[in-house]
């Protein structure tokens, strides 16, 4: 436990020092929120989910912020590999499982904080938190998304030599995961051939879970959402730990 | 005397490439032991196996009596490492880097803080404790890494090319640190280097390693004595005729290397005029003559037929070919 805490602590210190990173990763979901939100607010009507597109969009943007931050946190292990710091941890008398879990929790915490920042900003553009319970439900889902995708990033980083493949992963894996998740539109509005794909996207359940927590309505039963994203978090952690074990430097 | 490290028939293969070939040696407690050889000779691979970072293909190695494969964790607790490439977290301060290390090795908090301050004083970085490592020079980083490697009181310290890329002044400083360290703390130190001078000055014993094999192992003095006295180097266009005309009994051995003749003999100063006279009588043009006492460079040359620099270029070529093979 103390080792996991140590690695987590390092992630936190690095996070707090990287002001530009904090601002950088908030800007994207924030711009989405402002441009899409205000731009489409008057033209988009979502049946059964209130008349307000911004309110619909906010949980999606929170999830987006968590998703991108956590993938990036996981993939950062490549920097540690390249700058040599990973060796320092790998040669210490600690297990790789501890290192991997420390990284995962560190990444998830970072992502959670980023998500909360978006949530706080959203309060000024129309977010009305329904209840304290709802708020904590949303936080719970954010943690699960954070764990899932930090572990996902670690898994990818364990197989990558350098950052050159990063853009590829972002464009062809992470962005589709985001786009298909129902963060921007209700899944019921998709054509029948695309809807099943959305249901295969684990982030869909994360977004729906946050949406349930923040707005009180969702298209997927929150219990189902919890089970799917929770299960996905477990599986990704196992895969990430497995691949990280085999990392060689 | 007991052994700190024992290595038996250690081998590491990457596919067809044999990086370390069946090496055996023992390092005594408290000794400074050097692995000297060109880049790509297998020094770092040997160190990686001894520090449990890589599994041997065959053979065994023990550190403080613990097997590197079976008792990984015990070995890791017993050793401190300064890697060839920097392994500090540049975003953290010197103190934080040390603290992180102390936590990883589970040193209790009070003890940890005390040792961190002591060691930072030892490497003269105490007043930079709260500065971010990014602002440190190469020499400061190296010193910090050495301090960090000592934090958990290892009984064996691995230094992989400790002064690579440092300026001569910093290098001299570091050598002094390392020598003092070994004396004061009685730590066994194993270091790799391709600087002859470094090996000569620091090491109690040296293993010269080339193409994955140990080709010589002794004290620097014995290695140099083994060459057979001094060396006279003659540059001449008539390389092939020289060895024919010089047959005096006091000449130990004559070798040709590129466009030079190297004559190994004792008391070179006394005999040099005889040699020049003989060459003049035979009408052999002499461009230049020099005498020098044997260095480890000469030892390397006499064992491998190449200077360490030439060997390095070959090694790189081999590596490149290997990479190409792997890729296709």
Image (spheres, coloured by chain):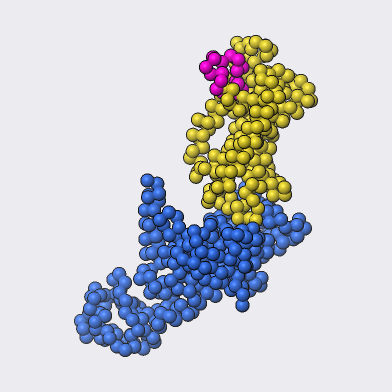
Image quarter where the N terminus of chain B lies is bottom right
Splitting the image into 4 quarters, where does residue A149 fall?
top right
Q: Position of residue A40 (x, y in %)?
A: 60, 15
Residue at (52% x, 43% y) in the render: A159
In the rendered image, residue A166, in percent from the top left (x then y), is placed at: 51, 37
- Give the side of residue A55 with respect to residue B216, left or right: right
Residue displayed at 61% across by 12% down: A44
For the residue pair B27 and B276, the one nearer the viewer reads as B27
Q: Could you tell me residue A225's position as x and y percent?
A: 67, 25
In this view of the protein, can residue A162 be seen by the observer?
Answer: yes
Where residue B81 sits in the image (x, y, percent)? Answer: 59, 60
Q: Which residues are magenta?
A: A180-197
The extreme right residue here reads: A132
Q: Is residue A68 above or below residue B202?
A: above
Quadrant in the rendering for residue A206: top right
Q: Which chain is blue?
A: B
- As drawn, is B45 to the left or to the right of A88? left
* Residue B129: in magenta span: no
Residue at figure coordinates x 33%, y 85% from the top left: B251
Is the stretch drawn in magenta largely helix, strand or loop?
loop
Q: Colour of chain A?
A: yellow
Identified at 60% across, 15% down, the residue is: A188
């Amino acid at each position: 436990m103390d080792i996991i805490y140590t690695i987590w602590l390092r992630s936190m210190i690095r996070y707090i020092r990287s002001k530009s990173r904090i601002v950088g990763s908030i800007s994207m979901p924030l711009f989405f929120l402002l441009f899409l939100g205000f731009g489409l607010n008057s033209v988009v009507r979502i049946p059964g989910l209130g008349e307000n597109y911004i309110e619909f969009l906010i949980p999606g943007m929170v999830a987006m912020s968590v998703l991108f931050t956590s993938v990036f946190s996981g993939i950062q292990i490549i920097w540690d590999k390249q700058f040599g710091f990973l060796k320092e941890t790998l040669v210490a008398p600690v297990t790789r499982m501890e290192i991997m879990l420390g990284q995962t929790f560190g990444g998830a915490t970072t992502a959670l904080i980023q998500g909360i920042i978006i949530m706080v900003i959203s309060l000024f553009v129309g977010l009305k938190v329904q209840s304290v319970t709802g708020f904590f439900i949303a936080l719970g889902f954010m943690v699960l998304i954070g764990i899932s995708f930090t572990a996902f990033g670690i898994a990818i980083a364990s197989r990558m030599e350098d950052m050159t493949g990063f853009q590829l992963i972002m464009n062809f894996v992470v962005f589709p995961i985001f786009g298909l998740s129902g963060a921007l539109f209700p899944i019921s509005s998709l054509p029948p051939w695309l809807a099943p794909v959305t249901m295969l996207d684990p982030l869909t359940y994360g977004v729906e879970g946050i949406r349930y927590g923040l707005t009180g309505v969702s298209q997927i039963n929150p219990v189902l959402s919890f089970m799917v994203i929770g299960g996905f978090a477990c599986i990704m952690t196992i895969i990430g730990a497995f691949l990280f074990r085999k990392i060689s430097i | 005397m007991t052994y700190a490290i024992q290595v038996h028939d250690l081998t590491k293969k990457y596919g067809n490439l044999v990086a370390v070939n069946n090496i055996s040696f023992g390092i005594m407690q408290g000794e400074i032991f050097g692995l000297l050889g060109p880049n790509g000779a297998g020094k770092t691979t040997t160190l990686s196996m001894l520090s449990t970072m890589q599994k041997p293909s065959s053979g065994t190695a023990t550190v403080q009596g613990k097997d590197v494969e079976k008792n990984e964790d015990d070995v890791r607790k017993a050793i401190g490492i300064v890697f060839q490439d920097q392994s500090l977290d540049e975003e953290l301060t010197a103190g934080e880097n040390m603290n992180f290390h102390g936590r990883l090795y589970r040193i209790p908090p009070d003890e940890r803080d005390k040792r961190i301050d002591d060691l930072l004083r030892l490497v003269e970085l105490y007043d930079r404790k709260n500065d971010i490592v990014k602002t440190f020079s190469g020499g400061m980083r190296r010193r910090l890494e050495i301090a960090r490697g000592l934090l958990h009181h290892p009984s064996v310290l691995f230094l992989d090319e400790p002064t690579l890329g440092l300026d001569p002044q910093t290098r001299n400083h570091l050598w002094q640190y390392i020598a003092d360290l070994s004396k004061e703390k009685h730590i066994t130190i194993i270091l790799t280097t391709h600087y002859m001078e470094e090996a000569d000055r620091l090491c109690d014993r040296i293993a010269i390693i080339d193409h994955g094999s140990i080709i010589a192992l002794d004290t620097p003095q014995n290695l140099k004595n083994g060459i057979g006295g001094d060396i006279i180097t003659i540059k001449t266009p008539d390389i092939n005729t020289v060895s024919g005309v010089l047959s005096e009994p006091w000449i130990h051995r004559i070798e040709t290397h590129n466009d030079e003749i190297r004559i190994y003999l004792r008391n070179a100063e006394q005999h040099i005029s005889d040699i020049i006279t003989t060459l003049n009588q035979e009408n052999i043009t002499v461009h230049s003559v020099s005498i020098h006492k044997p260095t480890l460079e000469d030892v390397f040359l006499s064992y491998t037929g190449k200077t360490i620099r030439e060997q390095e270029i070959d090694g790189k070529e081999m590596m490149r070919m290997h990479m190409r093979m792997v890729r296709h």
